[in-house]
Amino acid sequence: MSLKNIVAVSGEQGLFRLVSNKNNGLILSNLDTDKVQFFSMRTYQFTPLETVGIYTMTDTIELIDIFIKMRDSGNEMPEATNKTKNSILMDYFETILPDYDRDKVHGGDVKKVLKWYHKAIEHNLLLENDEEE
């Protein structure tokens, strides 16, 4: 199970796989369409998912560990749309990670995590061997 080379791009929908990097940007493949495209560092910001962490009261938990908890929990996951109330998202997230830092983790952050989780499941990124864990 790995999020290595998976990138979120500001202003773009979905997730991307890193194909190559250049000194002025990244060449990425869209996971949904397999379209390969160059994204300039001057125009876009990149978030490698393997570097994302969620603040807790004592430490930071890696995104992959949050995804594993979400996958293994039997709790029904709310849909992360623009119309979903933050209180519903935060209540769900509290069941997954009860000690998250409420001052640093906001509804928009949880919405991103849920969207990324659904994309990871859709593209079988969480179905690899559990030996790495």
Image (cartoon, rainbow, N blue to C red):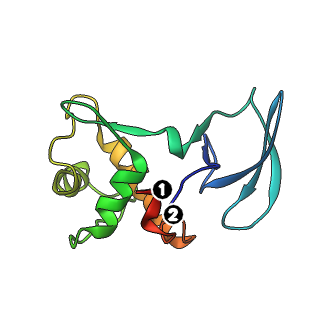
Judged left or right of residue 43, residue 131 is left
- For image coordinates 76% across by 65% down, the residue present is 34
Q: Amino acid at mark 2?
A: Ala
SS assignment at label 2: helix
Q: Residues within 10 Å of mark 1 (few under 14, many from 20)?
A: some
SS assignment at label 1: helix
- For image coordinates 46% across by 39% down, the residue present is 52
Point out residue 65 in the picture as x, y percentages from the top left corner: 36, 52
Q: Is residue 17 above or below residue 59?
A: below
Q: Amino acid at mark 1?
A: Trp
- For image coordinates 49% across by 72% down, the residue present is 127
- The residue that label 2 is drawn on is 120
- The residue that label 1 is drawn on is 116
- For image coordinates 51% across by 63% down, the residue present is 120
Judged left or right of residue 16, residue 41 is right
Point out residue 90 in the picture as x, y percentages from the top left corner: 22, 49
Judged left or right of residue 15, residue 41 is right
